[in-house]
Amino acid sequence: MKNSGLKIWLSVIFVCLSCLFARAQQKTYAIIMERINQDLQVGINDGVLTKRITKNLPALKSDGSWSDINYADVQYDPLNRIKDMASAYIRPSNKLYQNVELYGAIVKSLQHWLDKNPKNKNWWYNDIFYPQAIGQTLILMRNAKTQLPVELEKALINRMIRKLKTGDGANTSDEALHYLYRACLTQNRATLDSAAKYLFEPIAIADGKEGIQVDGSYYQHGKQQAIASYGRVFAGNSVNAAFYLRETEYALPKAQLAILVNYLKNTFLRTVRGSFYDFNVRGRGISRKDSLSSGMGGMVGKIKLFDPENAAYWDASALRTARKKAVDYGITASHSQYWKSGYTLHLRKAYTFSIQTASIRTLRTERGNNENILGKFLPDGATNIQRSGSEYANLMPVWEWDKIPGTTSRDYPDDNGATILKEWGTPGTTKFVGGVSDGIYGVSCYDLNYDSVQAKKAWFFFDKEVVCLGAGIKSSAKENITTTINQAWLRGDVASSNGAQANGKGEIWAIHDSIGYIFPQGGNLEISSKVQTGSWHRINHFQSKTELKHNVFKIWLNHGQNPQNASYQYIVVPGIDVAGLKKYNRSMIQILENTAEIQAVKHIGLDMLQAVFYKPGTLSAGGLSLRVDQACTVYIKDLNGKNPTLYIADPAQENAGIQVFLKLPGMLKPQNINCNLPAGALSGATATFKIKE
């Protein structure tokens, strides 16, 4: 009897605990779904929403289809239109709130979608966008006083089911997001478990695989830099997931939180100036209208709710990206050399300057789905120079694509020369690509050998200026070879001393839109401020064919036909006017060497030397002697201090160590330094050595 009574009590306790667990689980679903519902309505302008709906509604036919949509090639519409209607229907602030006609249109259009079951040739729409959009609409309609027909909702939920692909970076989190929607709608624990697991799976260091790299950059579609293309999707989904699941049993673990915060703070958000992306991090998305508008929305504001320790940083970022504060608000100086991705990012309050390159270890910027058709030269040292942030926004349709800022290339007569012929996965062609950095300053290099053009290209980064050198430029192609300095929106006057020099010799300067350009040795400089024409369709076949005309500032050096050892020198000085440029103290910058073997710059004011050795060699200048036994990049800080610091890296990522012989002015005896370099996943990273006598 005693055992029997104990069993009954245990059964009662088990039932009670099960009920409590079930209620707790139901509460979890309710909390998550309410957060999703509120998030879906952030930033909605009821007037704009109503106007959009009243424009589209008359085209809805009696069968629930829209007369202006080709259902054989459906992309974002009609699901976006249906979600619009659901948003208006449940919002008390909207004129169409609980509108009977609107409810009928929602039901009819959803039923038609269910019956028609459209498919797109691009898997992304079928497996990611469609189920996401359906899930969002169903969650919105759960707030309606008049619910959707039960059988219709159930059938649509079943239509959302897709087999989740794991280990696919941003795509995995994209798919897991609609798993989360479905878990909330069905209150299915197994689905919620899967959603949480795979939403957070990409938040990991994935050396050499798709995802976050050890240097903080991001890969997608192979070893291709995708910081704010697929990396933007990853960031958005990860932030949303952490925001939705915070303070529940599914909350983001601390170790993964640290990885996500590091990516957001030290990589992703640094690529946004004001509210505009650096064009170098948008991948093939550069060919889409408004692609440089960051559209952060409430993303940054959400982060501090699950990462309160960095609340001040997130607040400053939210204000800056929302244009409520100046573009330099909360910005601190930094220099990042992403050796895994061939990307360099130099950040100052006055400007952002970045470079994108490709090597045999990485892929060139892709053309895919007929997007980025003319982006052939994007990974050949493209330089993004921003002050306001909007210098290039929506200018790409009229760009001359064989004159991408920073690149040295053939000057083709038409677009065909800049056309990427192969879709997806074109590898780089050169191995000596990378640089050295101390986190504040650095130097980057690119051994260009592409499209029958060769050049040694290097960039030296300081505070007020960036020094850009090119040497060993040669080509046997029939076209002129040019180095483009910039190609941006024409804003205001262009001032220049060009034309005052004799025979292309002697220093030249130019200034436009508060950015100065100095050419210490002159050159055949050309400047244009003409109207350029083009269309989005010429670079992306999914975009409009409407011809556009924009005023463009373009500045480039013409090296002529068949150059065999041409070179260039120019200094970019952002945040300056004509008077300031004339007073600019050029003597602070000493260009010590600019050959195909060594490129080196000394900054007197900052007391530092930066150099690129393309082969073993010796740099001698002003009592300084620097010899290396392997090709490398070198940066020495505090040249005249008691304990200078040596920073060194191997851009080819081949050597375990480099021998450095160093004699500095005032040094009692030369130093022989055996520099052991980082290996494995860190190969190409900077090594640091204190120099002591």
Image (cartoon, grey):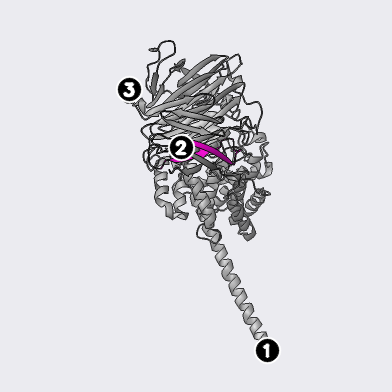
The amino acid pointed to by label 2 is: Pro
- Return the mark for residue 288: none
**Badge 3, how many Cα within 10 Å: few under 14, some, many 20+?**
few
Between residues 299 and 576, which one lies in front from this camera angle?
576
Which residue is under mark 1?
1
Residue, x 49% and y 22% (percent of image)? 484
The reply to whether residue 636 is visible in this rendering is: yes
**Badge 2, how many Cα within 10 Å: few under 14, some, many 20+?**
some
Q: Mark 3 or mark 2, which is nearer the start of the sequence?
A: 3
Q: CA distance from mark 3 to mark 1?
A: 102 Å
Q: CA distance from mark 2 to mark 3?
A: 40 Å
Q: Secondary structure at mark 3?
A: helix
Quadrant in the picture for residue 370: top right
Horizontal relation, residue 272 to residue 409: left or right: left
What span is in magenta?
643-661
From the image, state whether disc 1 or disc 2 is nearer to you. Answer: 2
The amino acid pointed to by label 1 is: Met
Please state the total of marks drawn on the protein image. Answer: 3
The amino acid pointed to by label 3 is: Lys
Which residue is under mark 3?
582
Between residues 61 and 664, which one lies in front from this camera angle?
664
Which residue is under mark 2?
670
The reply to whether residue 279 is visible in this rendering is: no
